[in-house]
Image: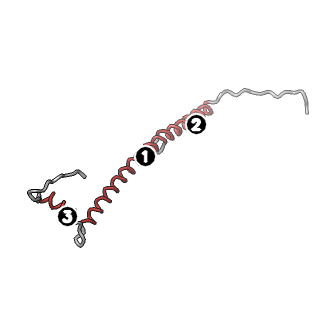
Amino acid sequence: MQLGKRRRVVARPHLPKRRFGRVVAVGALIFLGAMALVGPTGLRAWSESATVLEKRNAELAQLRAERERIANRVELLDPNNADPDLVGELLRSNLNVAHPDEVVVSRDD
């Protein structure tokens, strides 16, 4: 072994293949990052889906309340045990049946 001898370092020129590979890798990373933000399953789509879900839940709650109201009304109109007040109200409103001395006050449901 010889001490004191230095190794000679040869500088390689930048190879175009290496540079091209790095550019492609960086481009792929940028593309994947952009798709993670604005792609069809990215953050923006996720927030839009969350907004749509909130709207649909509110609509579902409103429809359930309407369904409960209608179910209650159907139960009150059961032919075996009908509510006399509701039957009278429906007769008066649908058939325009009223006594001459009655005052009809309509209300919005």
- Residue at the (91%, 34%) spot, across then down: 1
Q: Mark 2 belongs to which amino acid?
A: Ala
For residue 49, which numbered disc appears in the image? 1
Q: Secondary structure at mark 2?
A: helix
- Residue at the (15%, 54%) spot, across then down: 104
Task: In this rendered view, identify the residue nearer to me: 57 or 26.
Answer: 57
Q: Is residue 88 above or below residue 62?
A: below
Looking at the image, the residue that sits furthest to the front is 101
Q: Secondary structure at mark 3?
A: helix
**Horizontal side of residue 106 vs 3, given as left or right:** left
- Residue at the (19%, 60%) spot, across then down: 89
Q: Mark 1 belongs to which amino acid?
A: Ser
Residue assigned mark 2: 25
Looking at the image, the residue that sits furthest to the bottom is 80
Q: Which-is-in-front pick, marks 3 and 1?
A: 3
Residue 33 at x, y percent in the picture: 53, 38
CA gap between label 3 and label 1 equals 46 Å
Q: Secondary structure at mark 1?
A: helix
For residue 87, which numbered disc appears in the image? 3
Going from N to C along the chain, the mark reached first, 1 or 2, is 2
**Horizontal side of residue 77 vs 5, given as left or right:** left
Q: Which-is-in-front pick, marks 1 and 2?
A: 1
Residue 49 at x, y percent in the picture: 43, 46
**Horizontal side of residue 12 vs 95, given as left or right:** right
Residue count near mark 3 (Cα–Cα under 10 Å), binned few <14, some 14–19, many ≥20: few
CA gap between label 2 and label 3 equals 77 Å
